[in-house]
């Protein structure tokens, strides 16, 4: 492949057909050609095509047999393939073509159809490669996660305080792993963690919602808040790091991170005893995008149907999103962000919590200046 151009290998013993395909594709792709399956196999020792178009009807080694041979060599078995078949041979090869997952294109070639088939095959191959890469990341992540959780369970039996410190460290590392994949929100986890701490301590001081926090270990709740975006580990880099507004389809995919977060924490709980940390973490992960008026996701809960953890994170999360710069926008100044949250009182946010937030906005301002330093830019 030269630059961003894909390399297409054309294999056909019919020179006229070979040149016809080359002429159609050469403006869009780099081309290499072979006039036999044996020639293709020899060429693959030095060439690394992104797609092979191979005629099914060739002497000595036909296209079907050539594909069987390729499948036995890991170094080339992954290369996507399109069969070339004469129109008048379609009936002859119908059973063989139907018995394989490989697509085909007919000759004599019609330029737009050939180009579209090649584009589609390359796109599908790229998607499959991305999926396989992400699945491997998931397997590695889950394997590491399972090991960490098993190790943590052993330590719980021996030394509870030491385990708590280790648990807090693992949670921080896991949160940082997610954040490293979403490079437009550097520091988001730490800022929202501290913001949640400010709001919780203020609720305690003002004796607000104490009935909902009777059994809460505030330090543990603050630690658990770091996992509110852990489900983003399942979201592709193409969406997480897109330098602009998401499409509706991409946004719907992004919204699934709340469900993915629940799934990940369920997996954690499968390897340890039920505990307060994972209970709070699951609520933060699943409900931080619910809105007071019921227009949020994933469940569209209304008012105090939304768990308190989710209502708290809604404010901390949105404040951070507003003041943080993005590739497509500057960060808002503190005053503008506060104004927007105030406007969302009773619609997006719990009105009581907005009042609490308004009573400590200077703490948020000081906190975010400290955490962001020179990275904070507003207008």
Image: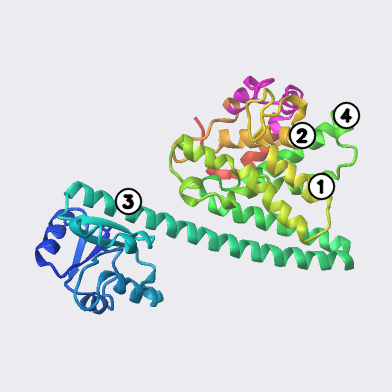
| Magenta: main secondary structure | helix
Residue 307 seen from this side: yes
91 in relation to 44, above or below:
above
Q: Is residue 208 left or right of residue 186?
A: right
Placement of 22 over or under 312, stated as above or below: below
Bin the neighbour count of mark 4 within 10 Å (Cα to Cα): few under 14, some 14-19, many 20 and up. Answer: few
Residue 343 in the image, given as x and y percentages of width and height: 62, 20
How far apart are the alpha carbons under marks 4 and 3?
61 Å
Q: On the image, numbered disc 1 is attached to which residue?
A: 219
Q: CA distance from mark 4 to mark 2?
A: 18 Å
Decide which of 371, 194 is in the foreground and name it.
194
The answer to whether residue 310 is magenta is: no
Q: Please report contact status of discs 4 and 1: CB closer than 8 Å, yes or no.
A: no
For the residues labelled 4 and 3, say whether their Cβ atoms are less than 8 Å apart.
no
Residue 365 locus on image (x, y percent): 65, 34
Mark 1 vs mark 3: in front: 3
Identify the residue at horizontal 79%, vertical 36% (top origin): 200
Image spot of residue 353 (x, y percent): 75, 27
**Range drawn in magenta:** 337-363
Determine whether, in the image, residue 300 is placed left or right of residue 204.
left
State the image quarter where residue 125 is shown.
bottom left
Give me the disc on residue 4. Answer: none
Q: CA distance from mark 1 to mark 3?
A: 52 Å
Q: Which residue reaches farthest left?
A: 16
Q: Residue at x 31, y 63 (%)?
A: 50
* Badge 4 or badge 3: first in the primary sequence: 3
Q: Quadrant of residue 214?
A: top right
Which residue is denoted by mark 2 in the rendering?
307
* Cβ atoms under marks 1 and 2 closer than 8 Å: no
User: Disc 4 marks which residue?
Assistant: 207
Q: Secondary structure at mark 1?
A: helix
């Amino acid at each position: 492949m030269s630059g961003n151009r894909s390399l297409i290998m054309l294999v056909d013993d019919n020179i006229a057909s070979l040149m016809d395909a080359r002429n159609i594709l050469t403006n869009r792709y780099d081309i290499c050609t072979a006039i036999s399956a044996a020639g293709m196999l020899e060429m693959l020792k030095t060439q690394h095509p992104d797609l092979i178009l191979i005629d099914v009807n060739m002497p000595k080694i036909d296209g079907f047999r050539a594909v069987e041979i390729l499948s036995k060599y890991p170094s080339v078995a992954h290369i996507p393939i399109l069969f070339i078949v004469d129109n008048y041979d379609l009936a002859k090869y119908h059973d063989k073509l139907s018995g394989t997952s490989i697509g085909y294109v007919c000759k004599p070639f019609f330029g737009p159809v050939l180009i579209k088939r090649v584009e589609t095959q390359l796109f599908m191959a790229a998607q499959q490669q991305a999926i396989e890469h992400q699945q491997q990341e998931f397997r590695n992540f889950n394997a590491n996660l399972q090991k960490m959780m098993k190790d943590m369970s052993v330590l719980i039996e021996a030394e509870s305080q030491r385990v708590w410190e280790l648990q807090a460290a693992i949670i921080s590392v896991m949160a940082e792993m997610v954040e490293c994949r979403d490079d437009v929100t550097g520091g988001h986890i730490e800022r929202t963690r501290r913001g949640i701490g400010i709001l919780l301590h203020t609720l305690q001081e003002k004796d607000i919602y104490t009935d909902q926090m009777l059994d809460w270990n505030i330090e543990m709740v603050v630690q658990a808040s770091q996992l509110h975006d852990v489900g983003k580990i399942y979201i592709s880099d193409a969406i997480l790091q897109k330098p602009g507004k998401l499409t509706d389809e991409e946004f719907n995919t992004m919204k699934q991170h709340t469900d993915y977060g629940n799934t990940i924490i369920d997996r954690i709980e499968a390897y340890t005893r039920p505990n307060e940390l994972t209970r709070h973490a699951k609520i933060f992960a699943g409900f931080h995008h619910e809105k007071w008026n019921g227009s949020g996701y994933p469940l569209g809960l209304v008012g105090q149907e939304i768990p308190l953890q989710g209502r708290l994170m809604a404010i901390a999360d949105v404040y951070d999103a507003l003041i943080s710069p993005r590739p497509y926008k500057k960060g808002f100044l503190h005053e503008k962000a506060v104004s927007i949250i105030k406007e969302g009182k009773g619609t997006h946010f719990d009105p009581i919590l907005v009042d609490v937030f308004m009573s400590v906005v200077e703490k948020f301002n000081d906190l975010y200046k400290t955490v962001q330093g020179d990275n904070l830019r507003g207008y």
